[in-house]
Image: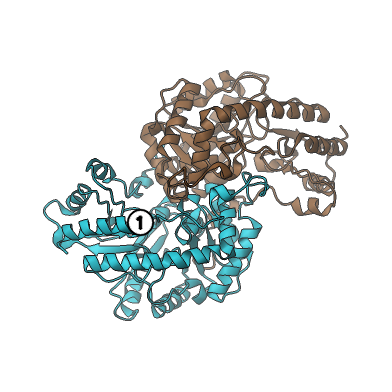
Chain colours: A brown, B cyan
């Protein structure tokens, strides 16, 4: 019971702003800054879908409240798209429009956990997911994903070892932030089967679904629609991270519970962002993504080669083990050394039990800037 | 532990979309529809602050992530404004920019309650506050506000009667949604004094601060800055409800906890909405509000006179006791009869223990539409 001046002690384990610790140091370095720590794109959204394209006189209600679950026109286009991509019948009743995938995953977790529950989180993971679970006073349980060369047996064993009487869901992200890996179909099928046997919900983070460079993105919804919530975002899809618009798709019976949480967390996604997303869904977005994908792929592959690591299969990230470059100052010392040369990286521990890893985003800046930053990193790594 | 297909039973008491039940019936009536149930404005935002005014080439990063706590330029202007209005030293460290006041109040409650805690809520109240409290598995405890003619003693007695070992905060909204009343300074001083004695947080909903027609808006922050969180919104201030931008202001030491909750609920307020708000804070917003206030005041007074009730002192609402117009079908029957004539009202129980009340918003449509809707209501009320 936190009375003034105390705040809730449960928040002690919840992270704050995870990426900004070294930014001031990089700025002070005086040279070019390489903001590889953020997960954003340097590209502007498709033409016709930018704020300046949204005219008050053409769009009645542009600055007014939208329906909390989402504008009817957007819900319709999202449902049609998801149905086509997953092969699963999908109507607006399966969709909730949210303030980005962050708001969407918050609505999911708020609906399906009670305080004290466990959520299994495949690791490495998107950093905010563990904080979302904790904000609802539940417990994230990381499950490190084994080397992808083998079959799914090792992963299943690790999941089973962490199942408990209060486990309510399993979270996974593919294409993965931070690793850039794409989970194989056989692994997803095995996880869906396990979830079915154990009565678990599946929470699938699909925000990088449009950014696959090798292999195939298998939507979890296509394998277990009765128990899967999938999160999607215009942030990554079409370069609209600041718009705060995305959606979650799940079983129709459960969506009213998600809507309740969403209404009380953010009320609705911004009206203008919903109009932008609706416009992008007329084909403009897909054309934009096709072009962006080729640019991202080329840059990611070039950076990976420069650093001597495996090319990413998807997403906009590389996750590097830098253990053999650390001295007595540990990872913080390495990140300091990077920041002193203008290079900002995200620390491995934000993504799970990875004390010697760093994440870099290769779409954060135009390719020439990224190449220069990669050269700095290669130098620091002795690559 | 809600495993598939169950969702959290704790959400059973959380309301969903509270205002839309009768909308289909009104639409089917075939005549003009009077959407008095929503709390919005018919006015467009100030020129220069609309989406079409935000040009990608002039505003680098317009569609990219903003800093989670808010853009530095906006934080600066907000802090200066709050300092001026409250007389309390206020810096960006006291401010968190949020997805409207809804996101802001969610961040406050997520930071200051633990499951099982009590939050005293002065009633009638803004409907979403009780759902926000419940989403964090705490318990809202309504405290009906007595007739404003007397001093604060009766209110203090009611608050004291509801204090318990798990009471962590007291919530109040002034100018009030739904009543249109403004809490007198002496009442706020008495509440601040009680909160100080009982170690309670104060959560003050100030979103109608710019819409006072009689009396004086006393910001709770000016009386007890060490324990007050105040919520503000561009939705009401400048006709930007769809933008999803607002802010909460509170003690600097507590703001990192609020920021944690906000990051995990919506990440940040939309970047474009923050730019719009920042522009409006250059004086354009105040000029807009000055003009809107006079229009709102005139309409509210005219509607109140037409209905034979007291003129509103603030906000954009009237809260009417319709007990003597109810038949065996109760309030629902009355709302049906309204909807059959195109008139939509918000039901009293959304705002607390008010089974015979309805709320109307007199800024939801242009004054001529509102006047016609008020005539329909007057007819139904026999006024």
Residue B262: tell me if it is visible: yes
* Residue A240 vertical placement versus A91 (above, below): below
**Residue under numbered circle 1:** B366
Where is residue A130? Give x, y as percent.
57, 43
User: Which residue does the image show at 66% across and 27% down from the upper left?
Assistant: A291
Q: Percent x, y for residue B142?
A: 33, 63
Does residue A228 appear in this view?
A: no
Along the line of sight, which residue is nearer the eye, B23 or A130?
B23
Report the side of B286 relative to A332 (left or right): left
User: Which quadrant of the view contains residue A356?
Assistant: top right
For image coordinates 50% across by 69% down, the residue present is B228
In the displayed structure, A149 sits above or below A383; it is: above
Circle 1 — which element?
Answer: loop
Q: Is residue A65 left or right of residue B274?
A: left
Image spot of residue A241 (x, y percent): 60, 42
Q: Chain of mark 1?
A: B
Q: Is residue B66 left or right of residue B347?
A: right
Crowding near pointer 1: few (<14 within 10 Å), some, many (20+)? some
Location of residue A260 with respect to B82 vertically, above or below: above
Q: Where does residue A244 sit, x and y in percent of width and height?
A: 55, 44
- What is the quadrant of residue A140 in the picture? top right
User: Along the line of sight, which residue is nearer the eye, A374 or B215?
Assistant: B215
């Amino acid at each position: 019971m936190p009375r003034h001046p105390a705040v809730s002690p449960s928040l002690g384990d919840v992270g704050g702003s995870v990426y900004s610790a070294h930014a001031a140091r990089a700025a002070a370095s005086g040279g070019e800054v390489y903001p590889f720590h953020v997960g954003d794109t340097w590209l502007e959204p498709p033409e016709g879908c930018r704020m300046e394209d949204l005219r008050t006189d053409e769009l009645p209600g542009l600055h007014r409240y939208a329906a909390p679950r989402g504008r009817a026109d957007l819900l319709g286009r999202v449902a049609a798209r998801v149905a086509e991509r997953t092969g699963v019948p999908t109507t607006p009743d399966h969709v909730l429009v949210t303030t980005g995938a962050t708001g969407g995953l918050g609505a999911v977790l708020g609906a399906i956990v009670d305080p004290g529950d466990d959520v299994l989180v495949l690791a490495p993971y998107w950093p905010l997911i563990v904080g979302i679970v904790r904000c609802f006073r539940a417990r994230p349980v990381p499950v490190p994903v084994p080397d992808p060369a083998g079959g799914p047996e090792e992963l299943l064993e690790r999941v089973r070892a962490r199942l408990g009487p209060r486990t309510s869901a399993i979270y996974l992200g593919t294409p993965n932030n931070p690793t850039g890996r794409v989970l194989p179909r056989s692994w997803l099928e095995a996880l869906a089967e396990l979830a079915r046997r154990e009565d678990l919900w599946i929470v699938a983070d699909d925000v990088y679904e449009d950014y696959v460079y090798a292999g195939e993105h298998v939507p979890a919804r296509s394998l277990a629609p009765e128990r899967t919530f999938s999160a999607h975002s215009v942030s990554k899809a079409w370069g609209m991270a600041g718009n705060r618009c995305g959606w979650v798709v799940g079983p129709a019976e459960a969506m009213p519970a998600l809507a309740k949480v969403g209404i009380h967390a953010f009320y609705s996604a911004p009206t203008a962002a919903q109009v932008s997303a609706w416009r992008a869904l007329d084909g403009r977005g897909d054309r934009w993504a096709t072009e962006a994908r080729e640019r991202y792929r080329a840059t990611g592959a070039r950076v990976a080669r420069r650093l001597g690591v495996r090319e990413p299969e998807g997403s906009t990230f590389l996750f590097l083990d830098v253990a053999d470059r650390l001295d007595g100052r540990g990872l913080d010392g390495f990140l300091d050394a990077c920041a002193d040369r203008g290079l900002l990286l995200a620390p491995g521990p934000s993504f799970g039990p990875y004390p010697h890893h760093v994440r870099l985003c290769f779409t954060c800046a135009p390719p020439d800037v990224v190449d220069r930053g990669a050269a700095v990193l290669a130098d620091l790594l002795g690559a």
